[in-house]
Amino acid sequence: MKSLDKFKNSFIVVIFTFLIFLTFIGSIRSTNLIIANTSARIFIIPILAFIAWILHKYTNFWSLISHYSLVLAVASFCFVVFFQFYMIFQTHPPIGFDLWAFYNANFLKHFQAESTYFSLYPNNLLLFLIQHKFITLVGTSRYWLRLDLLNVILVDLSALIGILASYLYHKVELTKAIWTYTIWLLFFPMIIVPYSDTFVLPLVSSILLLFVIFIKYTNTKSKFASSLFLGMLTSLTYFMKPSAIIPLIAFAIMNLFNFRKLNKKSLLIIFVFFISLISSYTVINHQLSAQNYIKINKTQHMPIAHFIDIGMSGAKGGYDQQSFNKMSALKNTKQRKAYSIKNIKSTLTTRGPLGYIKFLVAKQGYNTADGTFGWLQEGNFIKASSKRNSNIFKNYLYPDGKYLSDFKFIAQLIWILCLGILLLGFRQQDFLENTLRLGIIGGFIFLLLFEGGRSRYMIQFLPMILIMTIMTFNTSILKIKNIIATITD
């Protein structure tokens, strides 16, 4: 059995390292790093790095910083939260792509087009109904501002839950956890895009927190409570964004190795989980079926085969307007499924085995290498201009902002650093770390097989990546020090 566990762990680490390596190569080749596109302001980064080196080399400044690191981390986190809210009040632009259908469905009296949209994509129905209920409660004036405020609260809640999970798993990592989430929040402008990518984050983080409780607390009450809430959260997450339940699938697979000898307690834990899962799924599904605000035609939804077809088409395997137009013209889901399967077979025949593998290797980069997480890569992403009531935030984030390339450059550097930590942390192989690795692998494979082509879809998996970064930080830094020592000897 020990040899099986060792093989399992080694297999997970090898596959994870290979996929992260592909992402890392793609990230250092990113167009975000073209220095010629940036402004002179970008040179403040090497200047600050040089000042930090001087302070480290010739003063005890860093020792002082280290002594008050937790206090500084908490203060920085609070400052960034204030920074986020200020940014929202300075921006909150109208957002295009799917969110424009949400907007129209909230305000138009006759929204046949929006009914068609939700019939095609019923997976977005729960998100829309939550936003509609929220807007009904708080008022429809300043629609985008109100939704963005809710969005940032959910994103920050996800960060707090992630910090708590890191603390419960390894108390000495609290400061690193706060700093990690602080940096992420500072360079995460998706708070002004209130879509499922961000709304699902606190749910995914809560699932990871329950993993930690399940692992760290061995008493029966904790196990049963974790299983009960895990079932409910899984159902809610599934209806919010189906692919976001991948971490749970990874956790279940890892626990199968621990449940080789099922006892009464193990069976009861599994029973509680499934009862919670099925009952909560039934309740949510009933509520969605009973709603009468949006008329849904259940024979019109896009089949899974369609998203696989898109996922292997073109150069990136991303959204294709021509394919969408063709699918929309077909009468029902059955015809769409047949059409998609025909396209899948044709694409596989055309590419051949080696061609398809080459396509997947390139697609891994398109899916995951962009440190901005697909910022502005959707059609009609931000329906506003930085030239109107111009401010610093608009200049850094809007499509016509004069410092947009600076934001992309900095975000890409941070993503490369994160990937480097994940890549070098392979010796950290506890149960949680390998569960997170398996979950991230599952997320990567999902994006390789289904619609991808841009890294916005990675946002749902960020809670796993951030906690994994925290857990492997020390191991990676030690590895870097050993490499530097070897080179300089």
Image (cartoon, helix red, strand yellow):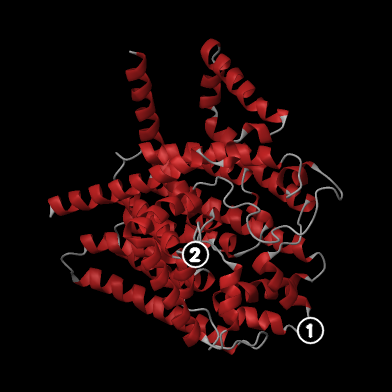
Amino acid under disc 2? Glu
Give the mark nearer the N terminus: 1 vs 2: 1
Q: Residue at x 45, y 64 (%)?
A: 312
Towards the viewer: 171 or 282: 282
Mark 1: few/some/many CA within 10 Å (<14, 14-19, 20+): few
Q: Is residue 150 above or below residue 70?
A: below
Image marks 1 and 2: residues in contact by CB distance under 8 Å: no
- Which residue is the site of mark 1? 109
Position of 271 with respect to 56 (left or right) is left
Please identify the residue farthest to the front as the structure is shown: 350
Q: Secondary structure at mark 2?
A: loop
Which image quarter holds the C terminus? top left
Position of 375 with respect to 335 (left or right) is right
Label 1 vs label 2: CA separation? Answer: 32 Å
Q: Is residue 376 above or below residue 100?
A: above
| Quarter assignment of residue 240 | bottom right
Which image quarter holds the N terminus? bottom left
Towards the viewer: 150 or 218: 150
Q: Is residue 374 visible?
A: yes
Question: Residue 407 at what x, y percent from top left?
Answer: 66, 40
Q: Residue at x 61, y 75 (%)?
A: 325
Q: Is residue 132 above or below residue 395?
A: below
Q: Residue at x 42, y 55 (%)?
A: 359
Question: Residue 119 at what x, y percent from top left?
Answer: 59, 82
Amino acid under disc 1? Lys
Q: Residue at x 71, y 85 (%)?
A: 112
Position of 227 with respect to 65 (left or right) is left
Mark 2: few/some/many CA within 10 Å (<14, 14-19, 20+): many
- Which is more foreground, mark 1 or mark 2? 2
- Which residue is the site of mark 2? 451
Question: Residue 44 at what x, y percent from top left?
Answer: 67, 26
